[in-house]
Amino acid sequence: MVGFGPGVGLRKISSVGMETSCEALLRELQHIWTEIGESEADKDRMLLDIERECLEVYRKKVDEASEAKAWLHQTVIAKEAELAALMATLGEHTMYSPMEKRLTPLKEQLALVTPILEDMRLEKEERIKQFADIHSQIDRVHAEITGDAHKNDSFSSVSVDEHDLSIRRLNEYQAQLRNLQRDKSDRLHKILEYVNEVHSLCRVLGLDFAKTMNEVDPSLHETGSEQLTNISNNTLNGLSSSIMKLKTEKKLRIQKLQETVESLFELWNLMDSTDEERRSFARVTCILGSKEKDITHSDLLSLETIKQTEAEVARLTKLKASRMKELVFRRRSELEEICRRAHLEPDISTAPEKTTALIDSGLVDSSELLANIETQILKAKEESVIRKDIMDRIDKWLAACEEESWLEEYNQDSNRYHAGRGAHLNLKRAEKARLAVMKIPAIVDNLISKTFAWEDERNMPFFYDGVRLVSILEEYKRTRQQKEEEKRQYRDQKKLQNLLLTEKELTYGSKPSPKRCNSFNRKVNGNHANGNGNGFMTPTPRRLSVSSATPELLSTHRSYSCRQNGYFKETRRLSTGPLNYVALPKEDNTSSFTSISGSEPESPLG
C-alpha cells in the first residue's frame, strides 16, 4: 500500500493520549472486513479509496502549508522591505540586520521583524510630528520676518516630505529654525531699541508717540496677545526713517532754541532782569553748552516751549526799545570805567553828549549804537589784558613814588625821633621806604625798556591817559635829575654859607654876642618854621616836584581834564637857570639859602 507500508514509514502522530497508529487501525479494519466477508477485490478497492482520500488530505495540508509558507515568506519579505524603507527614511542603519534565512524559520523571522517594524512605524509617526512642528515654526517665524504673518491665520496644514525623516535632516531644520529665531530675536531687540529711541525723541519734542508709531506700524504699540509684532524689514526701515526724521527735527529745534536762548541771555544782561524773571526760563537755558545727546528733558524742544521762549524774547525786545537810551548810557559808563582802570582814552564817537544828540535826532538806530559800544567794550577789555604787564610795573613805580613822598614828609617832621605811640612803626616804614626809593631809577629804566619792547612788538605807542608813557617816564627822569642837581647845589650853598660866616668871624675878631646869636637863631627859625628840622625851609611857592607828581598820576583816571594842571605842564615851568651865589648879599645869605632850599622839587606826580 502506498503511503502506509513499513517502507513508506508512517509518521507518528504526536498527539498526547493517542495510543494506536495507522497500522493498528488498518489491521483492525481488515479484521472487520474479514468478519463481514468482504472479497479481496472489495478490500483492495476500499483500501485504494482510503489511500486516495489520505493523499487528498495530505495534498490539502501540503497546499495549506505551502500557502502558509508563502504567506509567511511574503509577509517577512514585505515587512523587511517596509522596515528597510523606514530605516532608510529615518536614517537608521543599526537597528535590524537580516539573519541567515536557511537557518531561521519563517515564523521566527516574522516574530523578530514584527516588533521592530512596529517600533519603526511609531518612530516614523513621531518623526513626522517633529518635522511638521518644526516646519510649522519655521514657516511662522519666516512669515513674521517677511511680514506675511497676518496673511496666514493657521500653520497646522504643513506638508512633510516623508522620503527623508532622518536625524540629519531634522538637525538641519532645527539649525534653520535656530537661525530664524536668532534673527527674530535680533530684530525684536533692534525694534525695541528703535521704539525706545522714538519714544525718547517724541518725549523731548513733545510729539504724540502713539500717532508716530501708527504711521510706521500699528502693532508696535498694541499690547494685545493676539497681535503679533511686525519685525519685517519694512518695519525696521520705517522705524529707522522715522528716527532720522525726528533727529533732524531735533537738530533744527535745538538750533532754533539755542539762538532764541542766546538772544534771551543778551536781553537779560542788557535789561538787568531779576532772578525771578530768569527762573521761569531756567529749564531752557540748560540747552546752551549741552551736547545733542544730553538734551533729554521732557518737552524741552516742544513747539510750545519754543513759542514761549520766542514770546519772551519779543517782549524783552519791545521793552529794550523803550529803554535803549538808558542802556546805551549804562554801557558807555561801563566803557569809561574799564578805560579808567586801564588808563585808556575812551572812544569819543560814543561820548554821552554825542550819543544823546544822535538818539534824540533819530539819525542812528539805538541798537547799532549799543552794538558799537559793546564792540568798544570788548576792544577795551582786550587792550587791558595786553597792557597788564606794563600797568603792573607802573603801579610798582607809583607805589615807590608814594613811599618817597611819605619819606620826605617824615624827614621834615622834627618830632620823628621822639618816643611816642607808633614811632617804631614809622621807623620801620622809613627803612623800607628808603630801600624802595633806591630802586626807583632801576624801576624807571626797566619800565622804559619794557615799554619800548611793547611798542616795537605791536608797532604802536603805549599811551597812559592819552599821553605816551615813554614821554612821562623821560620827563620824570629829567625832573628827578634836576632835583638831584638842586640838592647838590643846595649842599654847595650851605658849605659856602658856613665859609662866609667863618670869614666874617675872623674879620671882626670876636664871635657874635649871645643876644645877637639868639636873635639870629630866632630869625632863622622864624623864617624856617616850615623847615625840615635842620633849619632849611621848604619852598613857599611850592612847585610840583618828582615825588609830588605821583598822586596826580594816580588820579588821572578820575578826570581826563586834570592833566591841564598836572605834572607835565607844571614841570615845564620849573626854573632851570644857574644860581649866582657870588652876587648874593652877605647879610641875606640865610634867606637866600632858604629860598634855594625851597626850590627843591618833591617826588613827581605827587
Image: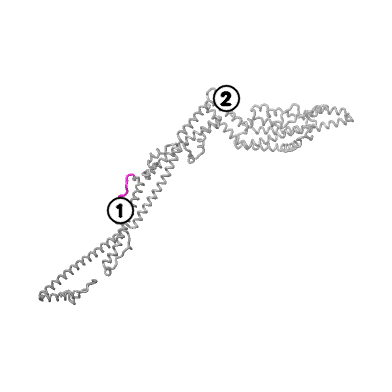
Q: Position of residue 337 (x, y in %)?
A: 61, 30
Q: Position of residue 75 (x, y in %)?
A: 25, 63
Q: Is residue 160 magenta?
A: yes
Q: Identify the residue at image location x=14%, y=71%.
A: 52
What is the magenta range? 150-162
Earlier residue among tags 2 and 1: 1
Task: Give x and y (percent) for residue 282.
Answer: 52, 35
Residue 349 visible in the displayed image: no
Q: Is residue 426 visible?
A: yes
How many numbered markers are drawn? Answer: 2
Query: Circle 1 sits in a helix, a strand or a loop, which is it?
Result: loop
* Secondary structure under the numbered disc 2 in the rendered image: helix
Q: Is residue 284 left or right of residue 382?
A: left
Residues at badges 2 and 1 in contact (C-beta under 8 Å)?
A: no
Q: Amino acid at mark 1?
A: Val
Q: Please identify the residue farthest to the bottom as the structure is shown.
A: 6
Between 430 and 147, the one nearer to me in the picture: 147
Residue at mark 1: 160
The quadrant holding residue 517 is top right
Nearer the observer, 442 or 306: 306
Extreme residue toward the front, this view: 35
Q: Main secondary structure of the magenta part?
A: loop
* Tag of residue 208: none
Label 2, label 1: how far apart the Cα atoms are:
99 Å
- The image quadrant that residue 353 belongs to is top right
Q: Which residue is mark 2?
A: 354
Residues packed near mark 2 inside 10 Å, few (<14), some (14 to 19) or many (20 plus): few
